[in-house]
Amino acid sequence: MPFLDLQTRLGINMDKWLLYQSGPQPYKRAARCHAFEKEWIECSHSIGQTRAKKECQLEFEDFYECLHKEKTHQRLYAIRQQRDKMVKEGTYTPPPCHSGKANESP
Amino acid sequence: MAASKVKQDMPPPGGYASFDYKRNLPKRGLSGYSLFGIGIGIMVFGYWRLFGWNRERRRLQIEEMEARIALMPLMQAEQDRRSLRMLRENLEEEAILMKDVPGWKVGESVYHTERWVSPLSEELFNLRPREDLLHKRFGFLWYV
């Protein structure tokens, strides 16, 4: 309930553990997008939803991108398509590090 | 009956020798209590050895974990160098490939923030043969 906050009163954690990734995790292992979510929550905390949608747009977009990686995949796909096109035209040969086994010592 | 002259099968003269026909259930072996005692004694001995060996295994496990902790900086540094090298190679190839594509900024980050974001396997292995990515993802599995 919104104003009673029974769980804090009773000291139990019935569903807070699944509400956001930035909460305490088992074995103290941070979520993959912990930083982005923390930034977004800190930005949009207690300023109301209408203001948060305007002011925290960048943080929210970063968090969304971290979750779904849409822009990353699109970018990688575009690069791959361009490479395949240029290989078919014959204007590009992949360097040895990108084709088969080069010397992969770190 | 008169004494017959027929040959019959009769016991030997003097009768048969006597033999045992009564029950023979000798009391032998240890008592029940001492058998319990022997069983419990073997169990206690087994527990004693087991607990000692478990403590030894725990010490060995701690040693293995400490070795892992000691090696972690080296492994992490190697992995980081490898990721950075692959990212650098990808950046240079991207510069070569997307030279003529209009409106493409090479090395542009998809995020608005300036923080370091750990690269995905897909990003690192983007321009390499697909089986390298599959080997990275599925080559070693913790489960069976």
Image (tube, coloured by chain):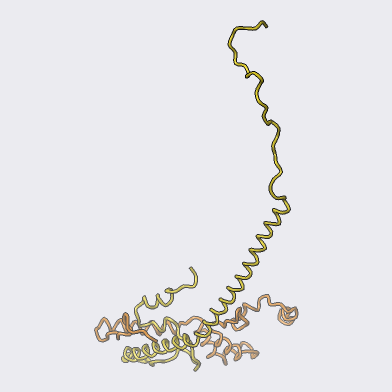
Chain colours: A orange, B yellow
Residue A43 appearing in the image: yes
Q: Position of residue B66 (x, y in %)?
A: 55, 82
Quarter of the image where the C terminus of chain A is located: bottom left
Q: Position of residue B109 (x, y in %)?
A: 44, 91
In this view, the residue farthest toward the bottom is: B114
Q: Position of residue B6 (x, y in %)?
A: 59, 8
Q: Position of residue B97 (x, y in %)?
A: 32, 88
Residue at position x 37%, y 88% in the image:
B90
Q: Quadrant of residue B38?
A: bottom right
Q: Which residue is at the front of the view, A8 or B42?
A: B42
Residue A51 appearing in the image: no
Residue at position x 71%, y 32% in the image:
B22
In this view, the residue farthest toward the front is: B14
Q: Which residue is at the front of the view, A46 or A8?
A: A8
* Marker count (numbered): 0
Q: Quadrant of residue A80?
A: bottom left
Q: Which residue is at the front of the view, A76 or B52?
A: B52
Quarter of the image where the N terminus of chain A is located: bottom right
Taking the image as shown, residue A48 lies to the left or right of residue A67, namely right
Q: Is residue B29 above or below residue B126?
A: above
Q: Quadrant of residue B52?
A: bottom right
In this view, the residue farthest toward the top is: B2
Q: Which residue is at the front of the view, B50 or B62?
A: B50
Taking the image as shown, residue B36 lies to the left or right of residue B6, namely right
Q: Is residue B7 above or below residue A63?
A: above
Q: Is residue A23 above or below residue B108?
A: above
